[in-house]
Image (cartoon, helix red, strand yellow):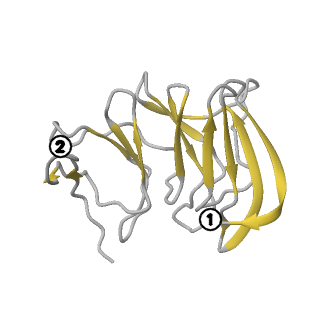
Amino acid sequence: KDIFSHTEIFTPTQSNSPGPNLSVARAGHSATLLPNGQVLIVGGKNDTTVHATAELFTPELKPVPLTSTLQVARKDHRAVLADDRVWILGGTDATGHGVALVEYFDTRDQQFHVARSASGNELRLSQGREDFDALFIEGLDIIVMAGGQIENTQSAAIDVLDVQAMTITSAQSKYARD
């Protein structure tokens, strides 16, 4: 399976056109539309490497500028925009193990940060996992994560991240699902 670094610009009223190349070829990465119109591309892998790098994609700029890096390289994670931050959740690392550490990209300072509780402890999911669902619920300021897989086993874990209080509450569903 080929992994590419090129991009395409899709315009609904016109045909697709080539965009700038990414700095590295990626698969299993996330792409999140930011309020300023840029797209944050995070993590992923190529044939030999799981990436901790990220790029801000702006169709007009060549090459795509790099941002700061994640603390933990990951692929097959979820990225959710909430409260001027892109929350980087789950995924698997270079060894194939689930990543529990929660990180975020702050759109104001354009840096990655490890999420920490008010007491300074790193925020971690109850289980590192991939291929799960994550949904931001506006008004409640929470991200709900459910299901997924942990090293090829379906997960019944449910985590709720309060993006204001910087806490995670965990529970188990009656049913494991991916």
Which of 105 and 13 lies nearest the eye of the viewer? 13
Q: Looking at the image, is 124 positioned above or below residue 148? A: above
The amino acid type of the residue labelled 1 equals His
Q: Looking at the image, is 121 positioned above or below residue 98? A: above
Q: Position of residue 111 (x, y in %)?
A: 44, 31
Give neighbour class at mark 2: few <14, some 14-19, many 20+ (Cα, 10 Å): some
Residue drawn at (54%, 54%) of the image: 77
Question: In which quadrant is the N terminus drawn?
Answer: bottom left
Q: Secondary structure at mark 1?
A: loop
* Residue situated furthest front in the rendering: 13
Q: Looking at the image, is 116 positioned above or below residue 173? A: above
Judged left or right of residue 99, residue 53 is: left
Q: Looking at the image, is 85 positioned above or below residue 97? A: above
Give neighbour class at mark 1: few <14, some 14-19, many 20+ (Cα, 10 Å): some
The part of the image, by quadrant, that contains residue 155 is bottom right
Residue drawn at (38%, 63%) of the image: 27
Judged left or right of residue 8, residue 162 is: right
The amino acid type of the residue labelled 2 equals Pro
Q: Secondary structure at mark 2?
A: loop
Q: Position of residue 178 (x, y in %)?
A: 66, 66
Residue drawn at (51%, 30%) of the image: 85
Q: Position of residue 92 (x, y in %)?
A: 57, 61
Which of 20 and 144 lies nearest the eye of the viewer? 144
Q: Which residue is mark 1?
A: 97
Disc marking residue 152: none
Gap in angstroms between the C-alphas marked 2 and 1: 32 Å
Q: Earlier in the sequence, mark 2 or mark 1?
A: 2
Disc marking residue 63: 2
